[in-house]
Each structure stands twice: as structure tokens, then as C-alpha cells.
Amino acid sequence: MNRKLQTIIIDDEELARLRLIRLLKNYNDIINIIGEAVNGEDGLKKIEELKPDLIFLDIEMPVYNGFEMLSKLEDPPRVVFTTAYDQYAIKAFEEDSVDYLLKPVEAERLELTMKRLEKENKSDAVSLPIESLLKQLNIKKDTKTLTVKIGDRILLIKPENIAYIQAEDKYVFLCCLDGKKHLTDFTVSGLESKLPDTFIRINRSTLINTDHISEIRKGFNGTLIFVMKDKEAVKLSSSRRYGEVLREHFEI
């Protein structure tokens, strides 16, 4: 096979999309950009509608992050990740056919990606199976800060200052030790995948920082109640679904 790869760019950052489109104009002989998507949900719709051969995919996006989006696809296209993951995670993919670009994407690094894709395209190479891809990408990022936008300001929140994370309706809040709550664009699942192992899920909508638990109480029907060390000493209940896993984790 030697034809242009029909391509969609999926990224919630407009500047990142525009930069990548500009850089990819140098490779019109290899790819043809047929669409853009602004989040994981939009990406799913565009993929189902346009059936691309290739997607350039961000990971940290609202609605569905990149991992969640891929997990919903029965027949995923080839994937090139464009993300802010640290270098150690990128090295894990140096030997694989699916590439992994650090943002902001540099022209020199993108050239290596395009050479790889061109070689695969000519040889009709088979992409890395999605199950293997998702398994290998399940790497916790050593996140030093989370960004929160408040008007024209951007706050940097350190994970160690977060007591718990909670979803309320369609909104997700970082709940800090000082009692302040900060709205974030990340999903609970997205935060779970990028934060250290001290953050664990106790129900569908809540992550807690185990470094900031003051007390654990037994609730009804196998549930647990966590008293946190934040200013309000908030009590958070686990769901029955997570009860057994949590009891094993805390050796209760």
C-alpha cells in the first residue's frame, strides 16, 4: 500500500492543533488532514463519520481523555500521541510502530514520525494492537502540578495539597487541604491515570489522597467512610463496588 493516510487531529488546545496542522503541511505527500476534533467525545464522532487511517491524539482532554476515547473504539486507526508526558514514558515507545510526541511538537521530531509512517505505509505494516497499546500507556505520570484556569489567571495546584477530587454532575473539582475547591477540565478517570499512586478511587466520582486520611470508619453493606485532613474534615463514603478492593488495600 502506498497512498495518503487520511488523518484527523484530536486536541482540545486550538493553538496545539494549529501548530500541528502547520507542521504537517510539509508532508502532504504522506497524509491528508480530513478533520479536527476538540475533545474525546468529538473525536469519537469524527472517527465514526470519517473513518481515518491515522489520528494525532492528545491525552489530557475534557469529556473523554485519549485513553478513554480509544477504549470505546472497536476498530481504532493508527495513533500518534501528542502529549505533555515526561521523557521516561516516551522512551517506552521508541521500538513500537505507534509514535509518541512531546508537546510542543518540534519539526525535527515530527520528521522522524513521518518517516516511520511513510515506511509503514509502503510496507503495509500492521499497527500495534490497541489492547497492547492501552496496557503499555497505563503509566502514571510524575505530575508536579495541575493547572486551573480562573479568568485570565492560571493557578498551579500541587497534588500533595489536594485532599480529594470529586465530580459533581458534569463538573470535576480539586478539593484542597485549605478548604478551597478548584474547577478543572480533567475527568476523574483522566486524573486517576496521571496522578501518583497515593490517589485512589473510592467510588465512581471520587478520588482521595491517601496521604491525607485521618480516619477510616466502617459503613453499611461493606462500605468505608474516610475522614479527610482538609480544613472541613470532610467525610467521604466508598461505594459497595469499591469496598472489597479498598479493604484489601488498607488491610482492614
Image (cartoon, rainbow, N blue to C red):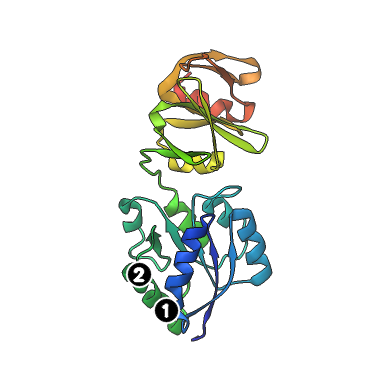
Measured as percent of width and height from the top left, residue 147 is found at 45, 40
Residue marked by disc 1: 26
Name of the residue lying farthest toward the front: 152
Q: Residue at x 47, y 39 (%)?
A: 153
Residue type, numbered disc 1? Asn
Measured as percent of width and height from the top left, residue 17 is found at 50, 63
Within-10-Å neighbours for mark 1: few <14, some 14–19, many 20+: few
| Whether residue 222 is situated above or below residue 165 in the rendered picture | above
Measured as percent of width and height from the top left, residue 109 is found at 33, 68
Q: Is residue 239 left or right of residue 246?
A: right
Quick one: 162 or 21, which is closer to the camera? 21
Question: Mark 2: which secondary structure?
Answer: helix
Looking at marks 2 and 1 on the same chain, the residue that comes earlier in the sequence is marked by 1
Residue type, numbered disc 2? Ala
Residue marked by disc 2: 107
Circles 2 and 1: CB atoms closer than 8 Å: yes
Give how far apart the Cα atoms at labels 2 and 1 are.
10 Å
Measured as percent of width and height from the top left, residue 75 is found at 60, 65
